[in-house]
């Protein structure tokens, strides 16, 4: 079920304030300590290899320009672009909201703070599995991609910890064994720039420095015979305040946005997981999960919004090896959520198909509601080696949610052919669906009669291992979208649009093992949308036909490491404004929009460099890094802003911290 009503109302309104960049910036006795960074991955978590990218948290954490945040480096992978200059990923022609996130095989809510900083302690992340298309049927209903995060287990040899301080915040971790069968860790983090710099003001907009906090914990009890009981918890919070003065340009264009903005967002998750070994090497995973989201937002003069969701989920997964080279995976999931809404605000039905979305002239709407929503799904996947080097993967997923009362049965099909011990050919196909956003289906504000978004994924790939360290991989894909959401005056929203995305990707990678490691990624792609009601077609707002990334890490000696990341991509599209076309009822000039996404921003390129040093001290290790972001100070254009008369425009440049640094002590 995908009925997570999270600040989508607020963001649709705040998107109108395009000049406001809201970013969290200014925002043994004595044994030799072991690094807490990560346990090396020696095998993949899932045998599925179709449209899959695997990278360790340690590699992403040390990526130049990431400030030590592993999720901040996801856009360095093929097919992944960042949304609005942030780290929130958009994959293969889909938007950031079209992805689903998993943590230790369990669905997770929003995993990013404001500004795209991930909610995870970097030292707890073992690896990422990115499924860019045609993913397995046990994953939830989305039309974009799956990002599956694995957190490492606590250490069992002794107690240890770490303290980390960087430019944006500080965090601490403690972990160790309780006895030979039990171990734990707990980590917590908070930003601190807001403690020293209270607010900044520019062009009539005052922004109080946002703050964020998060925590993660895991407790493992080994119950014998290869079984274990795991308690997992995590939580995050964000607070942001800003004020738009009446003389600010944005207030002159959208008077209703003048005033105070407040965003207070919290989410938490607790889960109890029992992993057990059954008969004949069969594995079972039973999980009980609780998630809570709480969002309280004020949007200038447009109104107020309170959203809360309290959900419980039970999930059962069973892996049955039938014979050598043949296994069946079964999964079932039930979720029940209590949703509370209290909204009194302008209902601006903004979509990508209508750039002329004006909040000030929108109708005021009110909704106070509380209801339960239920959803369940079941899936089966069969992996069978049908020949000595060919594996056939078939699957099916059934899902139902009772808010829109929609049920879908969707097949998946894949083939893996090892033409040589070092060469693998893959092919995959799957049908996928996704529930519309909360705003689009809510009573009063949306249309509760909408259908789910639909997508067909097709992917072909080849990978080759050159030697123990070098490998390359190439994939081509095609995605077809249908039942996309279009704004409509009478019904608010209707399923009236379609789209497609296709492309070719290439990845050349050298794994760590010598002085030099890294990868080169190249993506050639096209993503289009079509309003089926009007017949208008245009480029998707995050379309980047050419995107290239080079990542390198070089070990200078036992202590010093030098890293670099260079990214370049063709400009994203935007919708220009050509003067005015009359006035609104209150006398404001009405902008005259050209064709949707009919213009293109300039070519983008940027170089980040990272220097790192690790020191072995008496009783602890000390790790330090320093980053130069956008080293040659390229002035990349992120968009254009217009004056209140729409006669002048000026480029908008993304805010980039010129430097970043951090110090971490491991005990």
Image (cartoon, rainbow, N blue to C red):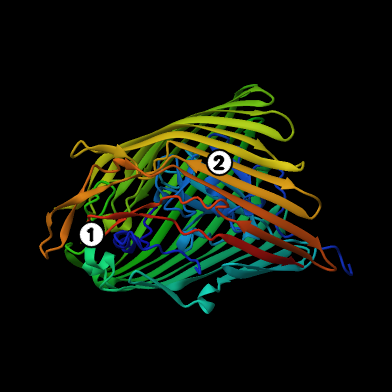
Picture quadrant where residue 362 is located: bottom left
- The vertical placement of 163 against 8, above or below, is below
In the picture, measured across the screen, residue 584 lies left or right of residue 661, that is left
Q: Secondary structure at mark 1?
A: loop
Q: Is residue 556 above or below residue 108?
A: above
Q: Quadrant of residue 587?
A: bottom left
Rendered image quadrant of residue 293: bottom left
Q: Alpha carbon of mark 1 to alpha carbon of mark 2: how far?
A: 38 Å
Say left or right for 298 vs 200.
left
Vertical arrangement, residue 440 with respect to residue 552, above or below? below
Pick the residue in front: 453 or 527: 527
Q: Residue at x 57, y 62 (%)?
A: 272
On screen, residue 611 versus residue 647, left or right, reads right
Q: In this orientation, which residue lies closer to the viewer: 106 or 436?
A: 436
Residue 90 pos. (x, y %): 44, 46
Q: Nearer the viewer, residue 488 or 287?
A: 488
Q: Determine contact: label 1, label 2, CB under 8 Å.
A: no
Tell me if I can see residue 126 in this picture.
Answer: no
Q: Tell me the residue at 44%/54% (across/down).
A: 334
Residue that carries the numbered disc 1 in the rendered image? 348
Question: Which type of secondary structure does the marked residue at label 2 adopt?
Answer: strand
Residue at the image point whose x is 61% and y is 70% from the top: 170
Labels 1 and 2: the sequence-earlier one = 1
Dot 2 alpha-carbon crowd within 10 angstroms: few under 14, some 14 to 19, many 20 or more:
many
Name the mark nearer the viewer: 1 or 2: 2
The quarter in which the C terminus is drawn is bottom right
Task: Please tell me which residue lies in front, 417 or 330.
Answer: 417
Task: Residue at 39%, 43% (x, y): give it.
Answer: 572
Image coordinates of residue 73 in percent, x first then y, are: 56, 50
Please say whether residue 600 is visible from this viewpoint: yes
- Residue 549, which numbered label? 2
Q: Residues within 10 Å of mark 1 (few under 14, many from 20)?
A: many
């Amino acid at each position: 079920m995908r009925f997570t009503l999270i600040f989508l109302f607020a963001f649709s309104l705040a998107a109108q304030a395009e000049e406001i960049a809201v970013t969290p910036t200014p925002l043994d006795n004595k044994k030799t300590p072991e690094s807490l960074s990560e346990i090396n991955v020696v095998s993949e978590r899932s045998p599925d290899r179709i449209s899959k990218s695997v990278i360790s948290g340690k590699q992403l954490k040390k990526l130049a320009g990431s400030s030590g945040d592993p999720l901040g480096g996801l856009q360095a992978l093929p097919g992944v672009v960042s949304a609005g200059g942030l780290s929130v990923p958009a994959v293969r022609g889909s938007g950031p909201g079209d992805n689903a996130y998993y943590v230790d095989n369990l669905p997770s809510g929003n995993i990013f703070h404001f500004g795209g900083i991930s909610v995870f302690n970097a030292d707890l992340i073992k690896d990422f599995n990115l499924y860019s298309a045609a993913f397995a049927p046990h994953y939830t209903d989305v039309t974009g991609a799956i990002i599956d995060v694995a957190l490492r287990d606590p250490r069992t040899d002794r107690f240890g910890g770490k303290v980390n301080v960087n430019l944006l915040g500080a965090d601490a971790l403690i972990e160790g064994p309780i006895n030979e069968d039990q171990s734990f860790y707990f980590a917590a983090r908070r930003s601190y720039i807001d403690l020293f710099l209270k607010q900044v003001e520019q062009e009539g907009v005052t922004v109080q420095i946002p703050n964020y906090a998060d925590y993660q914990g895991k407790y493992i009890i080994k119950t014998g015979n290869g079984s274990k009981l795991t308690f997992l918890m995590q939580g995050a919070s964000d607070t942001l305040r800003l004020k738009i003065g009446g003389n600010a340009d944005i207030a002159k264009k959208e008077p209703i946005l003048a005033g105070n903005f407040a965003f207070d967002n919290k989410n938490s998750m607790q889960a109890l997981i029992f992993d057990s070994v059954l008969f004949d090497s069969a594995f079972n995973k039973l999980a009980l999960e609780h998630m809570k989201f709480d969002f309280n937002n004020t949007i200038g003069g447009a109104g107020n919004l309170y959203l809360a969701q309290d959900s419980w989920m039970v999930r059962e997964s069973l892996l049955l090896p039938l014979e050598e080279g043949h296994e069946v995976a079964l999964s079932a999931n039930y979720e029940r959520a209590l949703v509370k809404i209290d909204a009194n605000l302008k209902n601006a039905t903004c979509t990508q198909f209508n750039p002329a979305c004006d909040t000030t002239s929108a109708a005021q709407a009110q909704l106070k509601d509380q209801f339960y929503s239920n959803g369940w799904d079941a899936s089966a996947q069969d992996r069978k080696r049908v020949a000595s080097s060919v594996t056939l993967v078939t699957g099916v997923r059934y899902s139902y949610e009772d808010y829109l009362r929609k049920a879908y049965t969707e097949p998946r099909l894949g083939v893996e052919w090892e033409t040589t011990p070092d060469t693998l050919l893959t092919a995959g196909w799957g049908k996928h669906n996704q529930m519309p956003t909360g705003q689009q289906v809510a009573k009063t504000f949306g249309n509760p009669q909408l259908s789910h978004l639909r997508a067909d994924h097709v992917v072909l790939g080849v990978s080759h291992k050159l030697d123990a360290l070098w490998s390359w991989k190439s994939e081509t894909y095609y995605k077809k979208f249908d039942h996309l959401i279009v704004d409509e005056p009478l019904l608010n929203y209707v399923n009236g649009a379609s789209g497609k995305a296709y492309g070719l990707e290439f990845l050349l990678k050298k794994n760590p093992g010598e002085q030099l490691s890294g990868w080169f990624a190249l993506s050639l792609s096209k993503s289009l949308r079509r309003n089926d009601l009007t017949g208008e077609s245009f480029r998707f707002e995050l379309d980047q036909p050419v995107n290239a990334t080079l990542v390198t890490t070089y070990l200078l000696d036992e202590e010093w490491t030098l890293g670099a990341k260079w990214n370049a991509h063709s400009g994203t599209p935007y919708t220009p404004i050509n003067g005015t076309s009359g006035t609104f009822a209150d006398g404001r000039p009405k902008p005259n929009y050209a064709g949707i996404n009919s213009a293109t921003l300039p070519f983008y390129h940027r170089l980040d460099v990272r220097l790192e040093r690790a020191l072995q001290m008496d009783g602890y290790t000390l790790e330090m890094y320093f980053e130069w972001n956008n080293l040659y100070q390229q002035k990349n254009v992120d968009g254009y802003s217009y004056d209140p008369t729409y006669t002048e425009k000026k480029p908008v440049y993304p805010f980039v911290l010129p430097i970043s640094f951090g110090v971490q002590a491991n005990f």
